[in-house]
């Protein structure tokens, strides 16, 4: 595993970048800042190495653009918590209101932009395990929590991402990886022409303001949210459907039917490069986010990134679950082990 310097966290603490590579020439780069997937390089159908995730060239650039969460590990609670408050065991905890009056991705100063420690490297298994300790009431959440992010690249070009956490108090655990995929290459612009299939027959609609779910679970049938068969991501993205206009595109949680087992959540493909993505998770939901709020700016190797230049498949518990009786709660008891497993596998499409 190659290790390079990736800059600092702005306080002179060094950040490292690890490269996992397999025998097919596939490479995954992981930064210790935020346990972040910086690059996912794969040979396309013409033999060109394509980097299919958005990112930056240094830790400093990640810190500068910290509202976007490019490739980051997000937690302790991914997605939104309304009114930035949560009650656990009868005690109300105040969180940072960093998205209107709500909490988004646990606040602006969380694990996504902190340095993780290298706990273990297994060269043979092509595996990197990172660890971070989040103190009691850090970001407002109860319990001292030890969090692990374990990245493995297989010879089948699958990137396994496993999150593990344990706390000394009952608390929230809901971690996700926030990679923005562009299967034409990170520097190739709008993803609207790429095709997507989701293994979800229902989604959780949003209230008109602030991207908070209403609590309903609605069928995707006959709506722009129907990705049960491959469809161009952009086909219905300009629809006048209110749900689409609330989020300026897709930024919604889809209901998966995996019953807690690792199963396909999504597939995506790009005709020009022939790159096909298979995404698996054991989580109950996935947030499809089509990069609706990426402001025009510079990314890796001088690439221009703008609106809809990447799509995210954020495996998760449903957003704002504490407010909705029908949503499974992302809670763990003191000492209980949290585990979440998500896989992103790349493959060339067979013609
Ligand atoms: C959220 C978006 C947000 C983006 C970047 C996504 O997970 O659903 O609303 O803009 O993350 O923070």
Image (tube, rainbow, N blue to C red):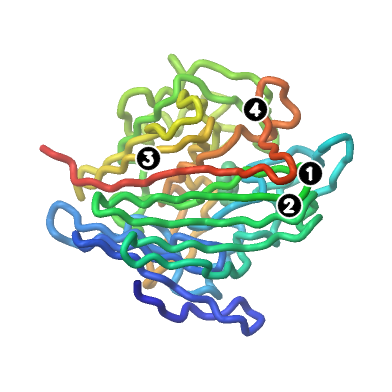
Write down the residue under mark 1: 84
* Image quadrant occupied by the C terminus: top left
- Residue in the picture at 67% in, 23% down: 215
- Residue in the picture at 60% in, 70% down: 115
Q: Are marks 2 and 3 in contact (CB under 8 Å)?
A: no
Labels 3, 1: front one = 3
In the rendering, at what x and y percent does residue 311 appear? Answer: 43, 45
Labels 2, 3: front one = 3
Which comes before the other along the chain, label 3 or label 4? 3
Q: Nearer the viewer, residue 122 or 109?
A: 122
In the rendering, at what x and y percent does residue 184 appear? Answer: 28, 52
Q: Secondary structure at mark 4?
A: loop
Q: Secondary structure at mark 2?
A: loop
The image's mark for residue 328 is 4
**Circle 1 residues within 10 Å: few <14, some 14–19, many ≥20:** many
Write down the residue under mark 2: 98
**Extreme right residue here?**
91
In the rendering, at what x and y percent does residue 143 appear? Answer: 78, 51
Q: Nearer the viewer, residue 193 or 36?
A: 36
Q: Are marks 2 and 1 in contact (CB under 8 Å)?
A: yes
């Amino acid at each position: 595993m190659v290790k390079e310097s990736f800059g600092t966290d702005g306080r002179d603490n060094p950040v490292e970048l690890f490269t996992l590579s397999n025998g097919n020439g596939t490479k995954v780069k992981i930064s210790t800042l935020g346990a972040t997937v910086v690059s996912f390089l794969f040979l396309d159908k013409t033999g060109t190495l394509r980097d299919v995730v958005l990112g930056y060239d240094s830790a400093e650039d990640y810190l500068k653009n910290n509202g976007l969460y490019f490739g980051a590990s997000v937690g302790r609670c991914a997605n939104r918590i309304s009114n930035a408050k949560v009650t656990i065991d009868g005690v109300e905890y105040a969180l940072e209101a960093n998205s209107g009056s709500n909490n988004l991705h646990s606040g602006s100063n969380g694990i996504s932009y902190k340095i993780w420690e290298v706990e273990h490297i297994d060269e043979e298994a092509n595996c990197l395990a990172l660890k971070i300790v989040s103190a009691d009431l850090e970001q407002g959440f109860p319990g001292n929590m030890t969090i692990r992010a374990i990245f493995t690249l297989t010879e089948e070009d699958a990137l396994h991402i496993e999150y593990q956490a344990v706390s000394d108090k009952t608390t929230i655990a809901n971690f996700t990886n926030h990679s923005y995929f562009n299967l034409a290459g990170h520097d190739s612009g709008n993803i609207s022409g790429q095709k997507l299939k989701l293994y979800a027959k229902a989604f959780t609609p949003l209230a008109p303001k602030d991207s908070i779910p209403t609590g309903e679970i609605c069928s995707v049938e006959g709506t722009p949210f129907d990705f049960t068969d491959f469809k161009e991501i952009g086909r219905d993205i300009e629809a006048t459907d209110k749900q689409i206009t609330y989020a300026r595109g897709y930024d919604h949680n889809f209901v998966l039917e995996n019953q807690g087992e690792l199963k396909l959540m999504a597939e995506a493909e790009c005709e020009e490069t022939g790159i096909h993505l298979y995404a698996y998770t054991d989580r109950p939901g996935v947030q499809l986010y089509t990069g609706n709020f990426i402001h025009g700016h510079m990314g890796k190797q001088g690439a221009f990134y703008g609106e809809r230049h990447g799509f995210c498949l954020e495996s998760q518990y449903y957003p704002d679950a504490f407010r909705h009786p029908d949503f499974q709660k992302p809670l763990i008891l003191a000492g209980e082990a949290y585990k979440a497993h998500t896989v992103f596998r790349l493959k060339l499409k067979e013609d």
